């Protein structure tokens, strides 16, 4: 005879904190109780309201990112990926509680790497790596929902795994505006240092660049050149003695976090003594260009 065993597992979720980013998102409040009593495999819901005021640092069509962190209050039974599933959508109102005009579904992911794509572009605008267990990132890549003077409602639906340990868990929620970026990457020359001397006995010049930006760097755009002192990188030679190595691609070194190359003077025809300038260019993944 077959015997069916039904095991009911309860998990109590405590909402321990709601934060907003940079003061741009205000009046965040919880509409329903702060506890979620979940039977394993069931779904609990909560609603949050917030406002996006007309402030100098805010702008229309800003992207919203919601970060939810779930933590077990019993250290012997930590949260693992797959213990919970999170679904979320937002309702938009132009005035608090009035003039509803849109519902926006939001994708929630706990993948180890989260890629945020720029709106209407295939390029990745920003990436987050090594996402912690129990952390979800939620946003809509095709709809940048934040509107000035709007009052919106977020609905979170949280489902627990049927095999979840019956214990207490904390849930914290952060609302963030993904910042716009119009500035190019900042390029710093690490090697060679200013005033370095090279000779026919030392024909290999180590090139090292530190490149930083709010968003990811487009590695295919990173390049450098060595030219005669005083001539712009995109200029042309004024006389026969002008030297220009031409643009040279440079690759990223995962171990050092720098873009590195070995410039061979013989290969690139640098055979006259003198002073030279090094130029570099790079773009971020949304097309902003920086120059050294």
Image: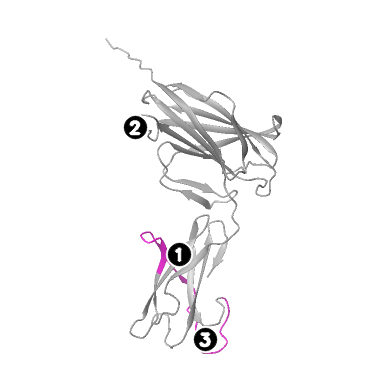
Between marks 1 and 2 in the image, the one whose residue lies nearer the viewer: 2
Q: Residue at x 44, y 67 (%)?
A: 209
- Answer with mark 1 or mark 2, whichever residue precedes in sequence: 2
Between marks 2 and 3 in the image, the one whose residue lies nearer the viewer: 2
Judge by depth and name the residue closer to the eye, 168 or 258: 168
Give the Cα separation between the discs numbered 1 and 2: 40 Å
Marks 1 and 3 in Cβ contact (< 8 Å): no
Q: Residue at x 51, y 34 (%)?
A: 17
Can you say whether 45 is above or below 262 in the image? Answer: above
Which residue of the protein is positioned furthest toward the top in this rendering?
A: 1
Can you say whether 166 is above or below 225 in the image? Answer: above
x then y, percent, for residue 184: 56, 62
Which residue, given by chain and number where applicable, does mark 2 sit on?
A: 75
Judge by depth and name the residue closer to the eye, 2 or 268: 268
Which residue, given by chain and number where applicable, does mark 1 sit on?
A: 210
Which residue, given by chain and number where applicable, does mark 3 sit on?
A: 242
Circle 1 SS class: strand
Q: Tell me the magenta residue range.
A: 234-260
Marks 2 and 3 in Cβ contact (< 8 Å): no
Give the Cα separation between the discs numbered 2 and 3: 67 Å
Q: Is residue 16 left or right of residue 120?
A: left
Q: Main secondary structure of the magenta part?
A: loop
Magenta-drawn stretch contains 6:
no
How is the model colour-coded?
one colour
Magenta-drawn stretch contains 250:
yes
Q: Residue at x 40, y 38 (%)?
A: 133
Q: Quadrant of residue 90?
A: top right
Judge by depth and name the residue closer to the eye, 2 or 200: 200
Circle 2 SS class: loop
Can you say whether 97 is above or below 256 in the image? Answer: above
């Amino acid at each position: 005879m077959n015997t069916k065993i039904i095991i009911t597992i309860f998990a109590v979720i405590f909402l321990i904190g709601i934060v907003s980013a940079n003061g741009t998102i205000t009046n965040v409040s919880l509409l329903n109780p702060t506890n979620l009593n979940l039977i394993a495999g069931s779904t609990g819901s909560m609603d949050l309201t917030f406002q996006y005021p007309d402030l100098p640092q805010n702008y229309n069509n800003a992207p919203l990112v919601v970060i939810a962190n779930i933590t077990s209050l019993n250290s012997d039974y930590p949260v693992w990926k797959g213990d919970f599933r999170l679904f979320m959508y937002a309702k938009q109102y132009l005035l608090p509680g009035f003039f509803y005009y849109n519902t926006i579904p939001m994708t929630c992911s706990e993948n180890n790497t989260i890629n945020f794509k720029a709106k209407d572009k295939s390029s990745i605008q920003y990436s987050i790596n090594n996402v912690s267990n129990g952390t979800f990132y939620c946003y809509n890549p095709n709809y940048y929902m934040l509107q000035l003077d709007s009052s919106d409602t977020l609905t979170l639906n949280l489902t627990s795994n049927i095999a979840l340990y019956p214990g207490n868990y904390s849930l914290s929620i952060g609302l963030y505006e993904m910042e716009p970026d119009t500035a190019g990457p900042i390029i710093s020359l690490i090697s060679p240092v200013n005033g370095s001397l090279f000779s026919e006995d030392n024909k290999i010049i180590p090139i090292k660049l530190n490149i930083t930006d709010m968003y990811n760097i487009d590695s295919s755009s990173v390049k450098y050149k060595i030219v005669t002192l005083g001539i712009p990188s995109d200029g042309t030679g004024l006389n026969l003695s002008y030297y220009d190595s031409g643009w040279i691609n440079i690759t990223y070194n995962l171990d050092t976090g720098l873009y590195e190359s070995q410039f061979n003077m013989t290969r690139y025809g640098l055979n006259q003594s003198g002073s030279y300038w090094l130029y570099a260019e790079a773009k971020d993944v949304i097309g902003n260009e920086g120059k050294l």
